[in-house]
Image: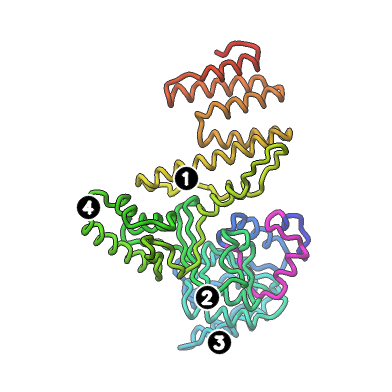
Amino acid sequence: MYSTSQLQSITGLDATQFESFVRTASIILLAPRFRNRNALLAWFTSLVKETYYYTLEGSNLTLSSFLQSIIDKTQDISPKFGKQTLQALATKNVSPQDLADTLIADLAKAKPTPRFFIIDNFDLLQPTDDVNEFFYYFAEKLPKGLQFVLNSRNLAIEPWHSLARSERAVVLADDQSLDGGIFDPEKAQTPHLEVYGLSGSTVYVNGLPLTTWDGPLPKHLFYYFVDHPMVTRDEIFETFWPDLSIKEATNVFHVTKRKISERLGFELTSYSGGFYRPSGQMSVHYDVHNFEELLAAGTSDDEEKPVIPNEWYDAIKLYRTPFLSGFDMPWIERRRQQLKQAYVGALIGIGRMHKAVGQHDDAISFYLRALREVPEREDVHRELMGLYTAQGLRDKAEEQYRMLKLILRRTLDISPSKMTRTFYKTLLGKDPE
């Protein structure tokens, strides 16, 4: 059933592995932070003829409005669908379990009988207690041969973590999310905090986005704590309130720290030994930390046999936007520049390794990516000029030099260095323009 060449390129699983992974699951969810989520959804929609596909619409859907929407849409395919569920919805104080039973009964009567029932934009359904109760029971009772596939931009940790532990649900490609995701059934069921400083400056608490901060200061201090896992009070005060007295800064600090705890629902830090440290009340997943660890893990002192470290490839995938784009505090701007240089260093390093093994097109691709970040780097322009010339593309090499000359004049009001001009003359046999 799952024999398609697309599957392994999307998920990293071959057809046999995939079928084994999802065999017992009633509900298949696509990991929200998985970058190929839409490609995976498209693959599912092309699987078999008996696939029902529905995109949720509206906002803040309740369990009742969700089921009503499912019925309305499915009646376009099976006109008599939903009779028992509609009767249950009209009943006062109907339980989530009764609604699950009636929907399963209606699904059994649908023509054609669905093999997959795909729901897109599933995050429009609010994760309330009655919704959780419905899916706990629904996943247990759904008959074999029918699987629900849910595509959502956000997933609350419950009920899906518990259902994954019981193998009634799987969160597909969650292992390719940050730190292996948060729905691994082998992981402890603890609070999860996901922080993305290199991907849109987003924060998720137990799978759901945190969007209200009660002002910019709590958000800034929150990111500072996450980025500085061990910091003194003096360092905090110097960063945020250098012009306030100790007493004034202390008052503002504790009020701001309390607001952070109220937003998260737990304490982010604890104080011991003169330092504010992670409290340990939650599992923290931080993309910047992962980015720096991957770069360090891929660094090798052995340069005799250039082997491109997989860790560097993984690191540059994490760098999707500049650090905390849109924030303008001095510490953030310094950190942003530091991380940008680390990213550029990885791109150039990968480019040089591709060049060393004769993979010139790949080398050019990574050098061009580096120049998008640091267009004034003469050494990278020289590398490109050399590669273009080696491929017989003298015109492109000359164009690269002219581009460098224009960039340096516009941004720094200087001309290319003597080294670059000499390189150009040696490479192309004529004086630079």
Would you say the residues marked 1 and 4 are in contact, meaning their CB atoms lie under 8 Å apart? Answer: no
Q: Which residue is mark 1?
A: 322
Give the side of residue 11 with respect to residue 294, left or right: right
- Magenta segment: 9-31
Pointer 2 with pointer 4, Cβ within 8 A: no
Residue 178 pos. (x, y %): 56, 58
Q: Residue 16 lies in magenta, yes or no?
A: yes
Q: Is residue 89 above or below residue 47?
A: below
The residue carrying mark 4 is: 244
Q: Earlier in the sequence, mark 1 or mark 4?
A: 4
Q: Earlier in the sequence, mark 4 or mark 3?
A: 3
Spot occupied by residue 284 in the image (x, y as percentages of width and height): 49, 63
Which percent across, then down, holds residue 109? 67, 80
Task: Report how many numbered discs are placed on residues in the image.
Answer: 4
Mark 1 or mark 2: name the one nearer the start of the chain.
2
How far, Cα to Cα, is label 4 from label 3? Answer: 60 Å
Q: Earlier in the sequence, mark 2 or mark 4?
A: 2
Q: Quadrant location of residue 170? A: bottom right
Dividing the picture into quadrants, the one containing residue 149 is bottom right
The 10 Å Cα crowd at callout 1, few under 14, some 14 to 19, many 20 or more, is many
User: 20 or 245, which lies in front?
Assistant: 245
> In the rendered image, which residue does mark 2 sit on?
68
> Marks 2 and 4: which is nearer the front?
4
Mark sitting earlier along the chain (1/3) = 3
Look at label 4 and name its amino acid.
Leu
Residues at marks 2 and 4, CA–CA distance in whole angstroms = 57 Å
**Does 174 appear above or below 415?**
below
Identify the amino acid type marked 1: Pro
Pointer 3 residue: 98
Looking at the image, is mark 4 or mark 3 nearer the viewer? 4
